[in-house]
Image (cartoon, rainbow, N blue to C red):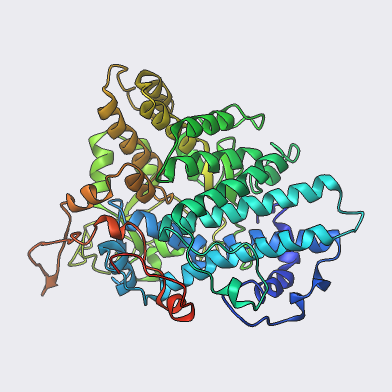
Amino acid sequence: MKKYPFYAQILLLALTAIALDSCSDFLDDKPKTSLTTGNAYQTAADMEAALTGCYNIFYGSDFYQWEYVMLSDVRSDNAYPGGNNEETFFDYDRFILPPSNDHNFANWKALYKGVARCNILLDKIGDVSDPALTDERRNQIIGEANFLRAFHYFNLVKMYGGVPLELESNTADPDITRKARATESEVYEQILADLAVAANSLPDTYGSDAAVNKVRATKGATNALLAKVWAQRPDRDYNHVLEHCNAVISSPANYALLANYADLFDGNHDMNSESILEVPYEEGNWSASSWGIELYLAPEDGWQKYCVPSKDLVAAYDADNDVVRKDANIVFWATDASGAPISWADENWNPCADPNTAIPFNYKQKHPAGWASGDDYYMLRLADIILLKAEAQNELGNTAEAVATLNEVRTRAGLAPLDAGISQADMKKAILNERRLELAFEASRWDDLVRAGEATNVMKALDEYTYTCTSGVVGPPVKMDYSHCDQDHWVMPIPQLEIDANPNLVQNKGY
């Protein structure tokens, strides 16, 4: 079983994290425990426990375990919902999600739970006088909490647009618990403010141990997130994107692409040079393992898995002769691990459950381990930042430089380099496609389509079909309907339960 020094605290401090959870939801008007006072935040150890609780959200929420990927790849052209075609994921895929949806509400709550844990820590740490909490460590903890809060708000603003900006928690004051929505720009400005604190407070590394440096917020992770924030905000600034991409690429942390793309996802190369920030799961440990991978991959359960690779994605790999990344990211199986035929019907690939027809699975992580996987998940990695640098160079008119940058990633995948004479417009398309092939099932595709302004065009142009099966005979194709994918539906609906509880909230247009 893998052990990581920093995250071992999660196991030792699980009760603390659970206790923090009881007072973490700022949308709840009623404080619940004595932890609403300052008595649980008095020592250096208390603050380390509080910080562990902040990181623990990556383990303890459906959002970061699997819906983070579903909301990007299923909503895009990369994947079908899969599962048993449950209403929630069908609605994600077809852009008809109602505000009353329970999963949407759970994702909102999970992200604000993460925000609230950071808020409490930041509120309490200034009062801790324990000499064991050195000034250096105090500043690092403040930087880590600001980074994590920014990370959660970045996901919130991408999913919902403007959201309530909660910077205080653990209160019953309705002026705080029932805030109106901030504008999208105001949320992005707060993200930048938090990341400015992180950039000034965090080290490039915490020493020589990758098992620490790759799982905690660092200056490199902050610059990577800043690059993505400046690219994604509506008033994007590619000069800033380029600045922060270069800061990552030239970091003293010495990030570098792995020579073999497949090594990134084989489960044997965790904490590698390409990793900027990852979630370190421990196989078989229910407090620190990943159950989300089972929902993508393990056919022996006897039911269809989620996030099924689309025919359009497979065709994109084949069109580029991209065998390396296709084989690393997608696996086709006709039998389960025991050799028995996979028995369910797949409405897109195998409607009559033909035992001779293989079905594709999301293969980004490869070891479900019975709902307790130890395969790590990258939140930030270098190839993403290199391709974002190419995007910035191209948008700033330096297309030849962008080609050279992008070719670093193509060469690693064993593909022929792009020609330096490509036009700026064609290069923009090439970068979007390269990001798709490199980052499939890493919660990137939907953001990329939105940033490029192509989400509606791409989804409405899809030529994808479902099929029924009657008495062993495949029925006629039924074209998948993406007519609801207008720009209003690039964001999700504000959960109805939040609107019911907070009269100051206004629903997104189109819902």
Question: Looking at this view, is 253 or 25 the one in front?
Answer: 25
Q: Where is residue 500 in the image (x, y as percent from the top left)?
A: 44, 81
> For this view, does 173 lie left or right of residue 122?
left
Most foreground residue, 452 or 306: 452
Give the percent coordinates (x, y) of residue 106.
47, 72
Q: Can residue 103 be seen in this view?
A: yes
Q: Which residue lies furthest to the right in this view?
A: 131
Q: Position of residue 275 (x, y in %)?
A: 57, 40
Q: Residue furthest left?
A: 476
The number of numbered badges drawn on the structure is 0
- Quarter of the image with the N terminus is bottom right
- When asked about the image quadrant of residue 208, the answer is top right
- Quick one: 430 or 26, which is closer to the camera? 26
Q: Which residue is drawn at 33% across and 71% down?
A: 88
Residue 479, horizontal then vertical, whole percent: 13, 60
Location of residue 190 with respect to 37 vertically, above or below: above
Note whether 401 is above or below 471 in the view shown: above
The quarter holding residue 90 reads bottom left
Which residue occupies 53% across, 64% down?
Answer: 111
Left or right of residue 257, residue 307 in this image = left
Q: Is residue 271 left or right of residue 386?
A: right
| Residue positioned 27% across, 21% down in the render | 422
Q: In the drawing, does residue 475 fall left or right of residue 149?
A: left
